[in-house]
Amino acid sequence: MERSDKVAFLKRAFGDVHVPNNGDPSIACPSQKCRGSRKKKLAISLTTDKTHCWVCGLGGRLITLLVQHRPSFVHEYLTRFVSSAGVVFDDSDECVDVQLPAGFRMLATVIEHDAHTTAAIKYIKRRGLTDRDLWYFKFGISTDVNMQHRVIMPSFDVAGKLNFFTGRSINDGAFRKYMNSDVKKKNVIFNELNIDWSKELTLVEGPFDMTKCDENATCLLGSSLSEDSALFAKIYKNRTPIVLALDDDMVEKSWQRIAKMLSSYEIPVRIIELGSFHDVGEMTKEQFLIAKASAVSWSRDAALAMKIKSIRL
């Protein structure tokens, strides 16, 4: 793609653009701190698509700037300037060194069980998980005072490096059900180490929902999927088919928007209906596979039919 093509795109998206002869273009920063200023102090690298405002310090990626301030141009940007073989984001300067909580022990490797270990394993088994799951998901416990009475589930990136962890309380009445590592969730692809991007990928809300899915699955770490997230970048890059299995109380709020957004990028989407279950975590693995086999392809007509059905129910 020619330099002039991207400059022309930036002019249409942001208006007046300053383009030096041998340098990167700059625009008036759209942030609240700089709003009203006509000074073109936000620089955009044409090679890396990194941005930086020399006045307020706003920085990041061009895709983030577009999503937040020029959303109508996001689709064109991804279609024209991000090849299916390329990488959308370069987060090398945003990496966070994640460490497991102090005294972490993998439950599958514990030989002598104390009260904490026994309680954690009972919780895992109560959720219908097996000894194999203890190894596969690398569940553990910690001596950290903030992680007591919690089962810890770590996540690893494609290179096998720890990139996130969550600690789930084994007491249902706990004030905080989950305690997570201090990482921006949109930069995390949970357990990417286990993902085959060439096959249909199941998306659920939380890590413990994943434990009931087939193995090619990951979680949103929430109920939304943004176009400036690392997960969306990989889905778009690989054109990975998606099957959504979100909590039933998020149906109207989430899966319609996510399905519509993915479909707009020509990503095939199917929807799993949970029936009487509140979330995937309540299912057995067999029940999940049966529901997945009946998942319906998303379309505007199918979405309308499902909405009408939910109203009748």
Image: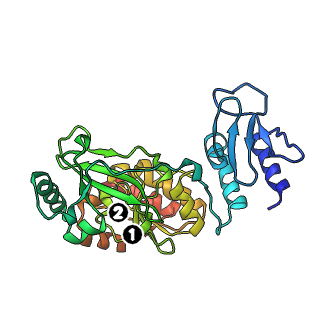
**Which residue matches tag 2?**
273
Q: Where is residue 53 drawn, in percent x and y?
A: 69, 35
**Could you tell me how far apart the alpha carbons at marks 2 and 1 are, in whole angstroms?**
7 Å
Residue drawn at 15 percent across, 59 percent down:
121
Q: Where is residue 260 drawn, in percent x and y?
A: 53, 57
Please, what secondary structure does the residue beneath circle 1 have?
A: loop
- 26 over 159 or under it: above or below: above
Quarter of the view holding residue 138: bottom left
Q: Amino acid at mark 1?
A: Ala
Please state which of residues 157 and 75 is positioned toward the viewer in this rendering.
157
Q: Amino acid at mark 2?
A: Glu
Please state which of residues 140 and 284 is positioned toward the viewer in this rendering.
140
In the shown orientation, is residue 233 left or right of residue 255?
right
Q: In the rendered image, is residue 287 in sight?
A: no
Question: Dot 1: few (<14), some (14–19), or many (≥20) neighbours within 10 Å?
Answer: some
Residue drawn at 72 percent across, 59 percent down:
81
Quarter of the view holding residue 27: top right
Q: Where is residue 16 drawn, in percent x and y?
A: 82, 38
Q: Residue furthest right?
A: 21
Residue drawn at 69 percent across, 34 percent down:
30
**Which residue matches tag 1?**
295
